[in-house]
């Protein structure tokens, strides 16, 4: 899994959970969004508008899941976290 963090300059932190491989739950600003990326035949996922605020983009390259996410913190530049073929999120707060 490759995480592409995008600066957003927001101090309200989101909570990220992974109940199963390729399934993500995001809680932020009183909202909770659950997304399932387990269909490996999809190259670029079509996300609902309500999801796009929390997960900007999701796609696969060579079978590896890429997620473009806002940082919800004081990050000043884009950062990439590469777990390679590992799909387990290690940044749960």
Image (tube, rainbow, N blue to C red):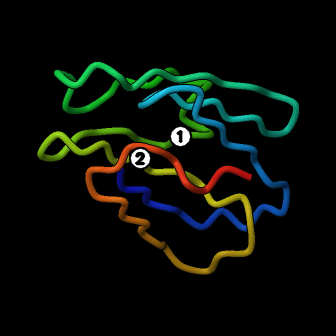
**Residue 58 position by quadrant:** top left
25 vs 82, left or right, is right
CB within 8 Å, label 1 to label 2: yes
* Mark number displayed over residue 68: none
Residue at 84%, 55% in the rendered image: 12
**Image height check: is 43 above or below 5?**
above
Describe the element under mark 1 as helix, strand or loop. Answer: loop
Mark closest to the chain's N terminus, 1 or 2: 1
Q: Position of residue 40 (x, y in %)?
A: 22, 25
Residue at 32%, 27% in the rendered image: 45
Q: Position of residue 9 (x, y in %)?
A: 73, 68
Residue at 66%, 24% in the rendered image: 33
**Residue at mark 1:** 55
Number of numbered discs on residues: 2
Residue at 39%, 26% in the rendered image: 37
**Image height check: is 90 above or below 34?**
below
Describe the element under mark 2 as helix, strand or loop. Answer: strand
**Image height check: is 4 above or below 76?**
above
Mark 2 closeness class: few <14, some 14–19, many ≥20 residues within 10 Å: many
48 vs 37, left or right, is right
Looking at the picture, tell me which residue is in the foreground, 22 or 78: 22
**Residue at mark 2:** 67
Mark 1 → mark 2, Cα distance in angstroms: 7 Å
**Image height check: is 82 above or below 87?**
below
Identity of the residue furthest to the bottom in this view: 76
Q: Position of residue 41 (x, y in %)?
A: 17, 21
């Amino acid at each position: 899994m490759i995480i592409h963090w995008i600066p957003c300059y927001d101090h309200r932190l989101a909570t990220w959970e992974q109940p199963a491989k390729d399934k993500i739950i995001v809680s932020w600003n009183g909202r909770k969004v659950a997304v399932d990326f387990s269909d490996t035949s999809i190259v670029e996922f079509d996300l609902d508008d309500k999801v796009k605020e929390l997960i900007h983009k999701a796609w696969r390259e060579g079978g590896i899941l890429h997620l473009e996410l806002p940082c919800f913190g004081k990050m000043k530049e884009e950062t990439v976290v590469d777990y390679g073929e590992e799909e387990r999120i290690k940044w749960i707060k």
